[in-house]
């Protein structure tokens, strides 16, 4: 794209700058639209599971419900509690929202269709997603109120706990793919199992348990049910969002759903072949890669909604037990197993 | 031009936020400025082409260490008056530390002017990704220090557990297998007590 803007008579620096801004907007704007539609879709899924109708008034089949909600919060007054730490109180939702967006810079939608194709892509995702907790912690502290503060403490402990096992799961994938670059990780899954027929690390018996661990950990990482203790309404009112109103509240929501969509994308990219079709058959490649990626993300989003509608909330000690006593040893064991298997098959035992 | 702009942006922000760490009145603000300083330092590493170190800096320091730091500082009950009264008492000690640091910086700068320690050795070709280069060195030439570092960390970890672990006799632990194995017929009793008698559990 830089070349295109250079042809318009810009210097290289300005062309690069403009191309990057355009690239960011091309990803961020559809993402915001997707968040609106995804909230609608999720409410419909919960409604269907609970034998209700869900939103069905605004627009055809209620499709415009999210936009009506968005307009409503936009027109409301932002209330800042008098004892809150004003600057941090307002910065917290901005951090949540920004961090949820910056991760998308390295997500590959097809070969070459990615904003920045860096060779530490997976580490970048890990780094950016570990920043997400700051929005919650700062919001909880700056609100100067009991419930948000408890929520901030819970969020910090939960995020750090599950990041450990996510790190080890990612190491397994990286060992198998031999690279940190997300596009190459996807391409490494091409026909890698089932006599070259199946695309995806998840079909590999050695990595399938890790795919499950990653799916569950990604729910914990985005504070979704059954791990939504951060905003457990029976104990903490609305958690860190208790004191927030209007747009500052909406930014938390947008950030949260952008994170959920991101985790769906990561599940698809790391374990289920990303933009590759599920089967390694020639005619399936006629469908554009982005369609396959969106289909897989849609599936995982449905799983997220399904779990939220059916599974009751964990107790906090159960949450910690699952993270530290089950997922951590399990993922550690699989790092050893995967590296052992690779030493045995790929590099020769003696090496 | 963009690289130069980015360098001055990161460098200025690093120094400014480091200064704010010291001068912020509120300790929580100090920690947040520290996080910003870490972040901009990672940006500087990125400009030097050390993307692996930059990412590790963000993951380890910003993502884990600083979160725990913030966690602790947020829960401290701080008396600001007492903090300020300690200023004159600790001033001489602080000045000594500052002088030592200044001397170190002077020595470092003069040593750097004398020429690189590596004796003119050039960094490896940039075609190889950081991670592979680091891995190759760590697992060949620096294998022994690397494993010793791992061992020291393990000992520190076990030490921390030993120091903080205490077995209290008065708590009932969760036995998850028993909770999962519980069946309705052993958990529920259906009784029909007579009027005025109540029931015994």
Image (cartoon, coloured by chain):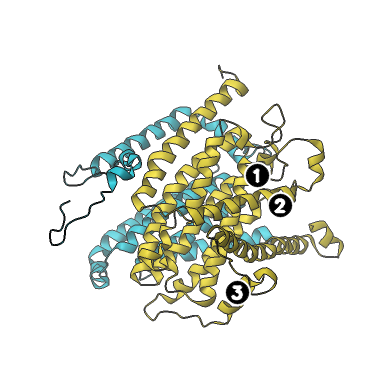
Chain colours: A yellow, B cyan
Q: Is residue A118 visible?
A: yes
Residue A235 horizontal side relative to residue A14, left or right:
left
Q: Chain of mark 3?
A: A
Residue identifier under label 1: A182
- Residue occupying image coordinates x 20% and y 47%: B171
Q: Chain of mark 2?
A: A
Residue identifier under label 3: A70
- How would you rate the neighbour count of disc 2 (Cα within 10 Å): few for under 14, some for 14-19, many for 20 or more? some
**Which numbered disc flags the more N-terminal residue, 2 or 1?**
2
Identify the image quadrant of the N terminus of chain B: bottom right
Q: Are marks 2 and 3 in contact (CB under 8 Å)?
A: no
Q: Are marks 2 and 1 in contact (CB under 8 Å)?
A: yes
Q: Chain of mark 1?
A: A
**Which numbered disc flags the more N-terminal residue, 1 or 3?**
3
| Foreground pick, A164 / B158 | A164
Residue identifier under label 2: A114
Q: CA distance from mark 1 to mark 3?
A: 33 Å
- Residue occupying image coordinates x 52% and y 65%: A95
Is residue B132 placed above or below A9 in the rendered structure?
Answer: above
The secondary element bearing badge 1 is classed as helix
Percent x, y for residue A224? 49, 56
Q: Are marks 1 and 3 in contact (CB under 8 Å)?
A: no
């Amino acid at each position: 794209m830089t070349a295109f803007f250079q042809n318009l008579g810009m210097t290289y620096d300005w062309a690069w700058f403009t191309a990057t801004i355009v690239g960011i907007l091309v990803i961020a704007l559809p993402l915001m639209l997707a968040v609106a539609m995804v909230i609608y879709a999720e409410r419909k899924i919960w409604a269907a599971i609970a034998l209700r109708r869900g939103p069905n008034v605004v627009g055809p089949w209620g499709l415009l419900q999210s936009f009506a909600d968005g307009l409503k919060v936009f027109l409301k007054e932002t209330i800042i509690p008098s004892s809150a730490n004003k600057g941090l109180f307002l910065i917290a939702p901005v951090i949540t929202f920004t961090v949820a967006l910056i991760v998308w810079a390295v997500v590959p939608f097809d070969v070459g269709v990615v904003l920045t194709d860096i060779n530490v892509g997976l580490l970048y995702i890990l780094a950016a997603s570990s920043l997400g907790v700051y929005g919650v912690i700062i919001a909880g502290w700056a609100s100067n109120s009991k419930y948000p503060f408890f929520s901030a403490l819970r969020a910090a402990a939960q995020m750090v706990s599950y990041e450990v096992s996510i790190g080890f799961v990612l190491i397994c994938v990286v060992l198998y793919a031999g690279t940190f670059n997300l596009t190459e990780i996807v391409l490494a899954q091409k026909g890698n199992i089932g006599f070259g027929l199946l695309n995806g690390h998840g079909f590999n018996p050695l990595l399938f348990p890790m795919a499950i661990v990653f799916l569950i950990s990604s729910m914990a990482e985005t504070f979704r049910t059954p791990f939504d203790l951060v905003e457990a309404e029976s104990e903490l009112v609305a958690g860190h969002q208790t004191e927030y109103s209007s747009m500052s509240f909406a930014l938390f929501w947008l950030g949260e759903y952008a994170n959920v969509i991101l985790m769906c994308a990561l599940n698809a990219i790391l374990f289920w072949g990303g933009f590759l079709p599920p089967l390694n058959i020639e005619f399936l490649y006629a469908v554009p890669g982005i369609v396959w990626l969106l289909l897989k993300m849609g599936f995982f989003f449905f799983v997220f909604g399904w779990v939220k509608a059916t599974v009751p909330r964990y107790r906090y000690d159960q949450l910690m037990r699952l993270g530290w006593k089950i997922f951590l040893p399990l993922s550690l064991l699989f790092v050893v197993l995967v590296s052992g298997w690779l030493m045995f098959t790929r590099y020769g035992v003696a090496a | 031009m963009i690289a130069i702009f980015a360098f001055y942006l990161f460098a200025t922000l690093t120094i400014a936020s480091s200064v704010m760490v010291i001068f912020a009145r509120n300790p929580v603000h100090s920690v947040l400025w520290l996080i910003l300083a870490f972040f901009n330092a990672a940006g500087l590493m990125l400009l030097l082409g050390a993307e692996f170190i930059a990412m590790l800096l963000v993951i380890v320091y910003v993502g884990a260490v600083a979160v725990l730091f913030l966690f602790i500082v947020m829960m401290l009950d701080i008396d600001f008056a007492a903090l300020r009264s300690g200023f004159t008492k600790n001033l001489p000690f602080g000045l000594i530390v500052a002088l030592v640091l200044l001397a170190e910086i002077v020595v470092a700068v003069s040593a750097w002017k004398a020429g690189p320690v590596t004796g003119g050795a050039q960094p490896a070709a940039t075609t190889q990704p950081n991670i592979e280069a680091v891995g190759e060195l760590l697992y060949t030439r620096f294998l022994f220090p690397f494993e010793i570092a791992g061992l020291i960390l393990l000992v520190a970890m076990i030490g921390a557990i030993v120091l903080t672990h205490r077995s209290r006799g008065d708590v009932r632990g969760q036995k998850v297998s028993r909770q999962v194995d519980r069946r309705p017929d052993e958990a529920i009793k259906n009784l029909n007590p007579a009027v005025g008698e109540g029931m015994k559990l």
